[in-house]
């Protein structure tokens, strides 16, 4: 197998991985974000609707729903799900662009492989909360 084909396969594998991770983290992020909003709204409704059980039951359910919403917000914030979603989305599109570049007549597989490695490192740093700008060695 020639070097160009090896790079094409690496590009395809990384793109598939990054897009899959972007979809997953998007789902987690939006589930927690909208879940917190829905839980808060339902908690308020439960507390105000007189026809829903006794006052004690409404208070218990309202408190439980509000607590669940607070937990969702805490997990959403401390889990940095948005950062993970964005890091994977940006990386996937950067890798997609390398897929276009490798198809050009003047493509340099060594350069593209180096860029692919840089994209992976930048993505990883964004996911774990490290600086994403890599300083050049002097």
Image (cartoon, helix red, strand yellow):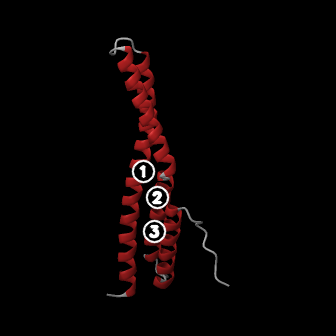
Q: CA distance from mark 1 to mark 3?
A: 19 Å
Q: Earlier in the sequence, mark 1 or mark 3?
A: 1
Q: Secondary structure at mark 2?
A: helix
Whether residues under marks 1 and 2 lie with C-beta atoms below 8 angstroms apart, the answer is yes
Query: In the rendered view, would you say 47 is above or below 93?
Result: above
Is disc 2 surrounded by few (<14), some (14 to 19) or many (20+) residues within 10 Å? many
Is disc 3 surrounded by few (<14), some (14 to 19) or many (20+) residues within 10 Å? many
Is disc 1 surrounded by few (<14), some (14 to 19) or many (20+) residues within 10 Å? many
Q: Secondary structure at mark 3?
A: helix
Q: CA distance from mark 2 to mark 3?
A: 10 Å
Q: Which residue is mark 3?
A: 95
Q: State the image quarter where residue 72 is shown.
A: top left
Q: Which image quadrant: the N terminus? A: bottom left
Question: Is residue 50 left or right of 127 when viewed as pictured?
Answer: left
Q: Earlier in the sequence, mark 2 or mark 3?
A: 2
| Residue 134, image x, y percentages | 60, 73
Q: Which residue is mark 2?
A: 89
| Residue 31, image x, y percentages | 40, 43
Foreground residue among 112 and 126: 126
Q: Residue furthest front?
A: 56
Measuring 52% from the left and 74% from the top, which residue is drawn there?
Answer: 118
Q: Looking at the rendered structure, which numbered label has been put on residue 26?
A: 1
Measuring 64% from the left and 79% from the top, which residue is drawn there?
Answer: 136
| Residue 123, image x, y percentages | 50, 66
Foreground residue among 60 and 29: 60
């Amino acid at each position: 197998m020639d070097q160009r084909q090896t790079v094409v396969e690496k590009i395809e594998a990384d793109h598939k991985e990054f897009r899959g991770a972007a979809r997953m983290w998007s789902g987690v992020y939006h589930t927690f974000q909208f879940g917190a909003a829905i839980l808060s709204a339902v908690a308020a409704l439960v507390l105000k609707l007189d026809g829903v059980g006794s006052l004690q039951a409404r208070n218990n359910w309202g408190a439980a729903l509000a607590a669940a919403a607070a937990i969702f917000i805490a997990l959403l914030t401390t889990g940095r799900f948005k950062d993970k979603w964005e890091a994977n989305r940006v990386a996937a599109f950067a890798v997609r662009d390398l897929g276009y570049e490798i198809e050009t007549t003047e493509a340099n597989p060594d350069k593209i492989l180096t860029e692919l490695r840089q994209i992976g490192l930048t993505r990883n740093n964004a996911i774990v909360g490290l600086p994403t700008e890599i300083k050049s060695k002097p």
